[in-house]
Image (cartoon, grey):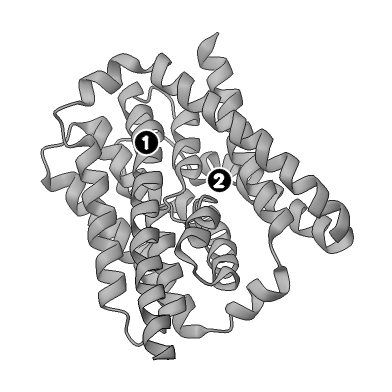
Amino acid sequence: MLDTILKITLVIFMFGNMLDMGLRLDLQKALKGLRDVRFVVLTLFWGYIVCPGLGYLMAITLPLSAPYAMALIMVAIAPGNPFLAIAVSKARADVNYAATFMLLASVVTVVYMPFMVPVLVKGLSVTPWMIAKPMLVLILLPMVFGVFFRLRWESAAAKVAPFVKKATGLDTIVMLILLLYVYRKGLISSAGTFALGSQVLLVAIVASAAYWLGFGLPRPQKQILVLGICCRNVGAALAPLFIIPNVDPAAIVATGALGTFVVIGSSLAVASILAKRAVKAEAEDTA
């Protein structure tokens, strides 16, 4: 019974977050950011080449059990959590490029994950289409609907978005509570392993490298890139695990519960650092 309720909360979590993003997304500004070739190329490079590659390398070299290695890979291949909006606000970063990042990450993830999951996670008896179906329904469809609704009825979208955000936030709390309760034994058993530490290390390495090896990317875009890397798309990472047969519950725990802790902790910590840097840079500019 609780397993069924948990799956329902996951569906609401993914659908609601992407609908909320679509309702708030300024498509014109997001598309304008896509003309920034350097930003787009570096987003794809760090988000879909370096991070998955490092995640896979860590999964096969660190002393991780199979479920935790699977979770690490799933988290590594899915950037772009809607929590990015909160992190961007705290960091005082560029909201327009945040919209570009989310639009790009959402579309690419839907295409990327169905093909990469069977390649990187060995021993899965799944086809790309099996993974693509929930991605299309729970990520792309609500985002497209939200964007269309905002374009057609902007004032109504502004009124609906806060309700969607609050409802999704409440659902997220319920989902995390259920995750912790239903898989409490697996969560307890993860203590003392590299399950949490490996995800923290992955995000720390890639985010730091993306910031310091900016390849000429201006500071505002670099901030969004780093925050986007920290905000792993836990919903997208979880979706395949619920349709793949006989998945070890420990993989769900490590992806959902631990992944969420990593997203919130790392993104808020990095946002705080970036905000201090922004204040310092402004002070130097006015001096």
| Residue 2 left/right relative to 268 | right
Q: Earlier in the sequence, mark 2 or mark 1?
A: 2
On the question of residue 41 being in view, the answer is no
| Residue 61 pos. (x, y %) | 11, 47
For label 2, the SS is helix
Mark 1 residue crowding within 10 angstroms, few (<14) / some (14–19) / many (20+): many
On the question of residue 114 being in view, the answer is yes
| Residue 80 left/right relative to 61 | right
Residue 182 vs residue 67, the one in the foreground: 182
- Give the residue type that dot 1 points to: Thr
Image quarter of residue 72: top left
Residue 143 vs residue 130, the one in the foreground: 143
Residue 247 vs residue 5, the one in the foreground: 5
Mark 2 residue crowding within 10 angstroms, few (<14) / some (14–19) / many (20+): many
- Give the residue type that dot 2 points to: Ala
What residue is disc 2 on?
A: 132
Question: Which dot marks residue 255?
Answer: 1
Q: Nearer the viewer, mark 2 or mark 1?
A: 1
Residue 63 vs residue 127, the one in the foreground: 63
| Residue 89 pos. (x, y %) | 53, 60
Please name the residue shown 25% across and 19% down the image.
188
Please name the residue shown 12% across and 44% down the image.
62
Instruction: Check the image and report above or below for 52 versus 174.
Output: below
Count of all numbered marks drawn on residues in the image: 2
Instruction: Check the image and report above or below for 94 versus 1.
Output: below
**CB contact under 8 Å: marks 2 and 1:** no
CA–CA distance in space, label 2 to label 1: 18 Å
| Residue 61 left/right relative to 239 | left
| Residue 80 pos. (x, y %) | 49, 56
Please name the residue shown 35% across and 88% down the image.
216
Image quarter of residue 46: bottom left
For label 1, the SS is helix
